[in-house]
Image (cartoon, coloured by chain):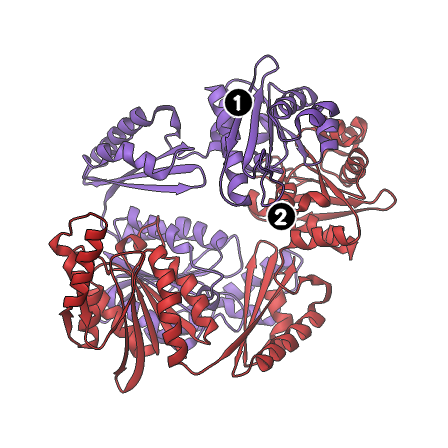
Chain colours: A purple, B red
């Protein structure tokens, strides 16, 4: 079975935006044993849309069309699909009522142009969109003597992804022959892509039936393992065997063997040990707190902390002595330790984390260059400080600093 | 003039990789007044490649083909282009010699399969590739009675980008009629895409010669205006005229008329007024501080603040009276105001910003549902509080809350 993904929107043909939805859709289709053979990106022009949809129907079994379901004049997907497949399009009274009801529940007045979102292709199944206005549509039809499955989905990722997972996947599973796919995601912090590959390539190349992909992003490495077999037990066993061997090789560099994020792992260990954490951040400016509080339930172990950009606030919120800053400078081993110890005491937590450094691009000197960061964790008795020199731009330095900080806490908890 | 970009490579059809080269090519083509009307991504299969190239030649004037020029069996672009255009492909002795010379200079022995990189399409100009082995090719031909420009480029970004800039751009500039492109980027906060479109569509539809694109992302709207004319003054005048009319219509919803981010604008206004800011964040957990400190130089106006996830820290760092929390609850109008006033006093800044709310998915009640957020800004004399009910998941609620918080500060500074 093969498929084509069509991403619609003139903004996707600018230098500023690109389709990313197709990655999620591809992952899901692969899980069903469906290959993606083409991706087409096309703007909001009727003629081009019709051509793209016709081409896709002519060469693949499953066509996933994303975007162009909104209420504006540019949203032409429904009309184009009707034209390409030569089937009718009618305004559906039930869907109109739902649109007005949704607007009313939000105390909004719905403008008339919104009604076009209630246009339904003949024979289409409505795909619910609890996160947005425009419903999706799915068709199971015969086109040029072949059976085709066609989906019309909204463009915003927050609407598209849950719709595909909850509305399309069960229907596709029913419509397609069964395949069993086992996957594992291993994650490692702070090892380079080629360094990791050099160590594990001799292992995974021996597993020809497991597809192994390495993805690297700012101090974080993700290893995706995928195996497809006629029986689930066989697929799972192969994936687990390879995962075990990789874990043996990379040891404690691996922080997750089931795909959790580093912040999830840190919070998990904290909770398991009944411990709490607070942070005092200078150069990361709230990034560590932000990453931890992304996780629902983080308030059970993460109490909060301070963003101590100015020296005054380092003293005020984390109790760093003024003369310590004067003597060693704000970016120093000593101040990092004092931040960790101080914030821990102020917040009355098991552990305190302190970070100070120079994120750049300005503010560096010969002695203390851009990228120099001190990170410290303290439990009141033991205070550990590490020094790192990161390279790259401001964003990269901040990301690496937050990654290193979380990893230091993880290692302390292990 | 329109164009199509074809990205070749089976890895670009997996969930883990995607074409990003096309963004650079699009930017360059736009600079020449060339629009990208289609992007096609296709795997390393002869039949699919030929089809993709034929489709592109049938519908656009300029076809940029990226990838598949290497020495392996999977590298089929040259053969596919020859087949699609029905022109000859011959091994070029000069190019063979260059390949062997290049390998020798690097003290490498060149395997025989590498020779296919010397295959040249009849009538093609060779595009030098100083960063890699495979040269590119460019054709200026008549296909189906129309003139077409076709480029074959290597896939690795480090080879493709310099080749396009240095080898293709001068040739394209010579081949194409001269056009000048003016652009403007307007940004607005906290207005929905369809609400914005309903207000400005009557304006921009009258400017048929200016391409207007609306991008929406979590409480942020970006309007891209682009106009291409034979003279720069004409293009600029049209774009500025439309920008002016849109600004008139959307008034203070527009926070930026040159593409700056909301955090840049807030920092700019603060600095212009010699004012400083501190924040006390509960449900946003550091996100507001993180957004502000992304900007280099933010330390001049942003002093820092506290992430007060627990009630104890609301009292400790922002001086919120315990009994106030007990009386009204942590998520209340009163506590938001106290956070803003308290953090301002603690940090000794001109303005204090306080945010408290329920990001979910748990923690909501009938009286105080998930998504309820109170935001407050205070200058010590005036304390303003707004209540918002955001919908969506945890990430969406936090993003909207941070966006609203920054926008309240911006409006206060205006």
Residue A279, image x, y percentages: 62, 28
Q: Is B376 or B195 nearer to us in this picture?
A: B376
The residue that label 2 is drawn on is B295
Q: Farthest right residue?
A: B381
Q: Is residue B157 above or below residue A49?
A: above
SS at mark 1? helix
Q: Is residue B148 left or right of residue A307?
A: left
Vertical order, B152 against B290 (above or below)? below
Query: Which mark, by number, is residue A271?
Result: 1
Near-viewer residue (A166 or A410): A410
- Disc on res. A414: none
Which residue is situated farthest in the left direction here?
A: B112
From the viewer's perspective, tell me whether residue A3 is left or right of residue A125: left
Q: Is residue B311 left or right of residue A47?
A: right
In the image, farthest residue toward the bottom: B145
The chain identifier of the residue carrying mark 2 reads B
Dot 2 crowding, Cα within 10 Å, few <14, some 14–19, many 20+? some
The residue sitting at 43% across, 62% down in the picture is B23
Please state the horizontal and vertical placement of residue B99, each as a whole percent of the image. 19, 59
Residue A236 location (% of width, % of height): 25, 33
Image quarter in which the C terminus of chain A is found: top left
Near mark 1 (Cα within 10 A), the count class, few <14, some 14-19 or many ≥20, is some
In the picture provided, is A89 more to the left or to the right than B312? left
In the rendered image of this protein, does residue A332 appear above or below residue A185?
above
- Picture quadrant of residue A40: bottom left
* Residue under the image location 39 percent in, 35 percent down: A259
- Depth check: give the residue in front, A183 or A408: A408
In front of the other: A219 or B246: A219
């Amino acid at each position: 079975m093969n498929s084509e993904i069509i991403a619609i929107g003139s903004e996707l043909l600018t230098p500023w935006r690109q389709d990313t939805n197709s990655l999620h859709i591809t992952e899901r289709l692969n899980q069903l044993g469906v290959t993606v053979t083409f991706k087409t990106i096309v703007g909001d022009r009727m003629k081009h849309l019709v051509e793209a949809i016709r081409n896709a129907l002519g060469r693949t079994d499953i066509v996933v069309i994303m975007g162009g379901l909104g209420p504006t004049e540019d949203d032409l997907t429904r009309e184009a699909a009707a034209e390409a497949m030569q089937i009718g399009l009618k305004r559906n009274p039930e869907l109109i009522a739902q649109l007005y009801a949704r607007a009313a529940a939000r105390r909004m007045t719905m403008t008339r142009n919104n009604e076009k979102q209630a246009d339904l292709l003949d024979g289409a199944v409505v795909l619910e969109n609890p996160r947005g206005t425009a419903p999706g549509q799915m068709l199971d039809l015969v086109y040029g003597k072949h059976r085709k499955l066609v989906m019309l989905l909204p463009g915003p990722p927050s609407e598209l992804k849950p719709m595909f997972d909850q509305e399309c996947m069960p229907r596709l599973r029913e419509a397609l022959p069964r395949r069993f796919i086992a996957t594992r995601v291993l994650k490692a912090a702070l090892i380079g892509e080629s360094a990791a590959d050099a160590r594990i390539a001799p292992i995974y190349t021996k597993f020809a039936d497991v597809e192994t992909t390495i993805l690297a992003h700012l101090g974080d490495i993700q290893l995706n393992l995928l195996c497809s077999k006629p029986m689930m037990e066989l697929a799972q066993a192969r994936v687990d065997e390879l995962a075990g061997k990789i874990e043996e090789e990379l040891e404690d560099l691996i922080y997750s063997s089931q795909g959790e994020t580093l912040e999830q792992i840190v919070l998990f260990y904290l909770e398991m040990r009944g411990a709490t954490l607070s942070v005092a951040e200078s150069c990361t400016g709230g990034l560590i707190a932000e990453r931890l509080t992304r996780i629902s339930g983080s308030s059970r172990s993460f109490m909060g902390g301070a963003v101590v950009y100015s020296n005054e606030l380092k003293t005020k919120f984390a109790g760093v002595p003024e003369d310590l800053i004067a003597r060693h400078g704000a970016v120093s081993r000593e101040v990092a330790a004092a931040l960790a110890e101080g914030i821990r005491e102020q917040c009355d937590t098991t552990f305190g984390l302190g970070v100070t450094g120079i994120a750049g691009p300005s503010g560096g000197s010969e002695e203390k260059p851009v990228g120099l960061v001190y990170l410290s964790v303290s439990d009141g008795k033991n205070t550990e400080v590490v020094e790192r020199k990161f390279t790259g731009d401001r964003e990269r330095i901040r990301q690496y600093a937050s990654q290193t900080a979380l990893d230091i806490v993880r290692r302390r908890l292990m």
